[in-house]
Amino acid sequence: MDEREFIRSNFFDIELTPETFFIYQIRKNILRAFQEAKVHFTGVVVDLGCGYMPYRKLILENQKVTRYVGIDLEQPTYYGDVRPDMTWDGENIPFQASSVDCVIATEVLEHCFEPNVLLREVNRVLVSGGVFFCTVPFIWNLHEVPFDHYRYTPFSLSRMLEFAGFDKANVTALGGWDSALSQMLGLWLRFRPMDKFPKAILTRVILRIIKKLEKTDMRPTVFDNSENSMPSGLAAICYKR
């Protein structure tokens, strides 16, 4: 499978199969959040922790965007032949102050040991009024161990963004109760040790459940102590003061 087909089938046109059920819901939810946010992207867009750079084409389709720059570590852990446009050390973004119009970071902040430091660095490189968009998991297993450090609530993420110098932070849920359950079932089936036969039976059952949960999920519109208290993940968009 070539790079373009891999990105298409794993990030955009992902199908619910025994190979994809554990990432199916989260990838679809992130794509939806990205589609909603991309209208705010302009000028130079930096994709921080870009990985496979799956959203490059989607970003460049926006005529207000003049340049896309994917930035990742010198030796990414699992991205095969994909190489970023620029590399960084995980702390210092290689751009001058006030030189970037937009920074995006999808599923990156949980891997930052000092996220407040990184957010201030994002703020430094953005122009006044520049846009920062990010997504973070709420329901997810430990991954890229030992570089998986945090899970964020809507309240902690909002406070951190404000503390770093951002204004008008809009934090939204990637999914609600049903989406969270769908992700947990997929992760449980993918990673819990079990014999092949029961796993094969459970796979058929859980795929049907996940398909049903996708149709019935309701994203929270507020975050409270009851029916709106279980987001599957979070997206945030905010602006440099």
Image (spheres, grey):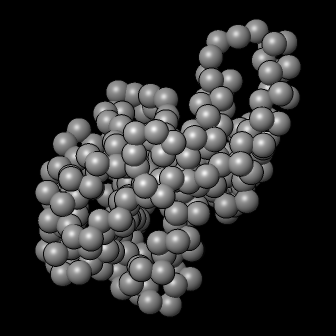
Of all residues, the one furthest to the bottom in this rendering is: 63
> How far across and how far down the image is residue 114, in percent?
19, 42
The quadrant the C terminus occupies is bottom left
Of all residues, the one furthest to the front in this rendering is: 226
- For the point 74% across and 39% down, the residue is 210
Taking depth in this image into account, of 29 and 49 the one nearest to the observer is: 29
Taking depth in this image into account, of 9 and 208 the one nearest to the observer is: 208
> How far across and how far down the image is residue 168, in percent?
27, 71
Of all residues, the one furthest to the top in this rendering is: 195
- For the point 14% across and 65% down, the residue is 165
Figure check: 129 above or below 89: below
- For the point 73% across and 59% down, the residue is 13
> How far across and how far down the image is residue 137, in percent?
45, 43
- For the point 51% across and 42% down, the residue is 227
Corner quadrant of residue 20 = top right
Taking depth in this image into account, of 149 and 25 the one nearest to the observer is: 25
> How far across and how far down the image is residue 201, in percent?
85, 19
Is 161 left or right of 195, judged from the image as shown? left
Q: Is residue 23 visible in the rendered structure shown here?
A: no
Is 84 left or right of 7, judged from the image as shown? left
Q: Is residue 17 visible in the rendered structure shown here?
A: yes
Figure check: 48 above or below 20: below
Q: How many labels were placed on the picture?
A: 0
Is 25 left or right of 90, judged from the image as shown? right
